[in-house]
Amino acid sequence: MMLLDTQDLLIFKHIADLYSILRVTEKLDYVQSNVSQRMKILEDELGARLLIRSNRGVRLTEEGTTLYKYAEDILKLMQDTKSAINKNN
C-alpha cells in the first residue's frame, strides 16, 4: 500500500512553483540533499519520473504535471480539514 507524505507533496509543489530545488531549500530551510532524496523517494513510490533537472532549473514531466494538479487539491483539502476541525474546537 502506498502512502503519500503530505510534506513531500508540499516540497514537490514548491519545486514546481519555483522551478528550483535550491530555492525551495532556502525557502523551507532544508538541506538540498534531503529535498533531493525526498523527491527520489516520491518518484520511486509513484513509479514515475516527476522532475527534469537541468542547469536552468527544474521542470515537470507529464507525470509531474499530473501529480501537481492532484497535490494542489490534496494540500487544499488538508488545509480545509484542519481549519474545519480547529473551528469546532
Image: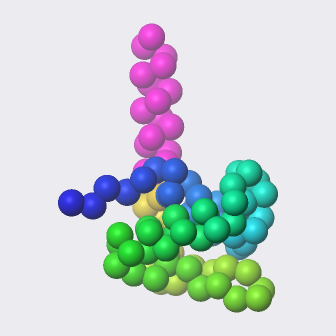
Please, is residue 42 above or below residue 55 in the view?
above
Q: Could you tell me residue 65's position as x and y percent?
A: 50, 75
Please give the name of the residue rendered at 50% of the width and 57% of the height, measured from the top-left corner. 8
Question: Is 50 placed left or right of 48 in the picture?
Answer: right
Q: Could you tell me residue 3's position as x and y percent?
A: 31, 56
Q: Is residue 16 visible?
A: yes
Colouring scheme, one of rainbow, by chain, secondary structure, one colour = rainbow
Please give the name of the residue rendered at 45% of the width and 40% of the height, measured from the top-left corner. 78
Question: Is 85 placed left or right of 19 in the picture?
Answer: left
The residues colored magenta run 73-89
Please check the rendered image and state whether residue 83 is part of the magenta-colored stretch, yes or no: yes
Question: Is 54 placed left or right of 67 in the picture?
Answer: right
Please give the name of the residue rendered at 71% of the width and 51% of the height, measured from the top-left corner. 28
Please give the name of the residue rendered at 63% of the width and 81% of the height, measured from the top-left corner. 59
Please, is residue 89 above or below residue 83 in the view?
above
Q: Is residue 17 visible?
A: no
Q: Nearer the viewer, residue 26 or 72?
A: 26
Question: What number of labels is visible?
Answer: 0
Please, is residue 68 above or below residue 54 in the view?
above
Q: Could you tell me residue 50's position as x and y percent?
A: 49, 78
Name the residue at the left extreme: 1
- Quadrant that contains the N terminus: bottom left
Residue 23, quarter of the rendered image: bottom right
Secondary structure mostly seen in magenta is: helix
Q: Could you tell me residue 89's position as x and y percent?
A: 45, 11
